[in-house]
Image (tube, coloured by chain):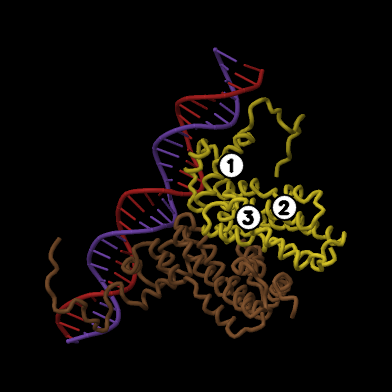
Chain colours: A brown, B yellow, C purple, D red
Amino acid sequence: MSEKPYVACETPVQSGRFAAGEDPAKREQILDGAKRVFMTVGFDAASMNDITREAGVSKGTIYVYFDGKDDLFRALMERERGNIARSMQDVLDGQTDAAEGLQRFASAFAAHITRDETVSAMRTMIGVVNRMPKLSKRFFNADSLNVRSVLEDFISRQVAEDRLAVDDVSMAARQFIDLATGTFFKLRLFGDMSEAPDQQEIDSVVSAAVRVFMAAYGKKSQ
Amino acid sequence: MSEKPYVACETPVQSGRFAAGEDPAKREQILDGAKRVFMTVGFDAASMNDITREAGVSKGTIYVYFDGKDDLFRALMERERGNIARSMQDVLDGQTDAAEGLQRFASAFAAHITRDETVSAMRTMIGVVNRMPKLSKRFFNADSLNVRSVLEDFISRQVAEDRLAVDDVSMAARQFIDLATGTFFKLRLFGDMSEAPDQQEIDSVVSAAVRVFMAAYGKKSQ
DNA sequence: ACCTTTTCGAACCGATCGGTTCGATTGCTC
DNA sequence: GAGCAATCGAACCGATCGGTTCGAAAAGGT
């Protein structure tokens, strides 16, 4: 334990060049390469050599920026953690009609979760759920819970304005999301549907879901 | 291509002992061990040495019965391929009331797909969906499609007997399954719900699903 | 008891893994 | 152009992987 020698300025002058392992651009570059590898072959089958090649960066450099494969994966998943909730909020903003709002919401959300990128990320996370339970919970909750709370707010507003008759808002929100997106979710996850569904396919399922939801929770007197 | 020589009896006399690699009991024993390993750590992380130890069988013997890791995994998944559809048929047999039939159906199906064993199998299959697309499709369809067709039959019967008003039976069946089981499916798969839900939890979600479904498709004049 | 055949068990193979090391190279600042 | 630090790149490490081999042991039929 040696005393730290006195220095006039603790933080070294960032004179153009970055300190080792602190160049944000290079960090992003590594994560981009790691993303392509992890998402296509999964955590186990992804080799650090593949990531090295894909990122166009020396192997040693990766270990300057990250502590190892696990740390790199963690950092990647933290970066990729969803921010879909905000855009779902935008979709619902200003929507007054319940049915139309639900339709737009589910359509956008279904399109999101069936994208190749999202599906790959979900598959990869499911593959490590036993090894990194906390990480996968965070990843799952980041999208799932936030998006659902956005929908809950919308439903609550509709109830307050007397356009919907819902007693258990949380349950209703869960029901609608499952109703509108559950099928695509499962089909895509298990590879039974190899490509993302087109908008027409989504809209057909979603509008059927809206009909059911409105039949159950819509105000009769409207 | 040599001609097969004439032999009096094509099938050799099974005189007590089995030919190498043809003892069904040993084959099962190997598959049981392989199942425990594959399901807990996934395909990649499962080592043949682990399986050897877990199955209580020599490594060489495994390679007498199976061509390798891939073949062993394939054989396991074929063996484990669901036969849940038949028991779901039993659940619905003799059910006349639509709501009660749906309740029983969903309750049993939700209990099945949230069992630790089922969840592990699904996670494992999702992990290899890129490498063995045909296998994972077969696995997914074995349960999913058959169970849904059982429900479709029930709904059709209800429609024929004028107890339900459904135009698109296939869509309605999908909707109900997603509505009643989608939440548990996702929560369990991503590890956000670490244990299988108890029957009370299931029934609460399922009966809410039945209410919504009946509101949408139930005959008003009843 | 003897023979046949399966199974065992342990060593071994080449390949690849995550991770480390270190001198050469690059690109920046002064 | 000199000096310096980050990066490169290639070799290297021990461990583990799937898979193979082979003599010893075990089990059953005759």
With C23 as the anchor, is A80 left or right in this view? Answer: right
Residue type at mark 2 is: Arg
How many callouts does the rendering have?
A: 3
Q: Which mark is residue B188?
A: none
- Quadrant where the C terminus of chain A sits is bottom right
Which residue is under mark 2? B104
Which residue is under mark 1? B31
Q: Secondary structure at mark 1?
A: helix
Q: Chain of mark 1?
A: B
Q: Chain of mark 3?
A: B
From where the camera sits, is residue A194 visible? no
Q: Earlier in the sequence, mark 2 or mark 3?
A: 2
Q: Earlier in the sequence, mark 2 or mark 1?
A: 1
* Position above or below: B168 against A161: above
Q: Position of residue A55 (x, y in %)?
A: 42, 72
Considering depth in this image, is A134 or A70 the residue closer to the camera? A134
Q: Nearer the viewer, mark 2 or mark 1?
A: 2
* Position above or below: B67 against C19: above
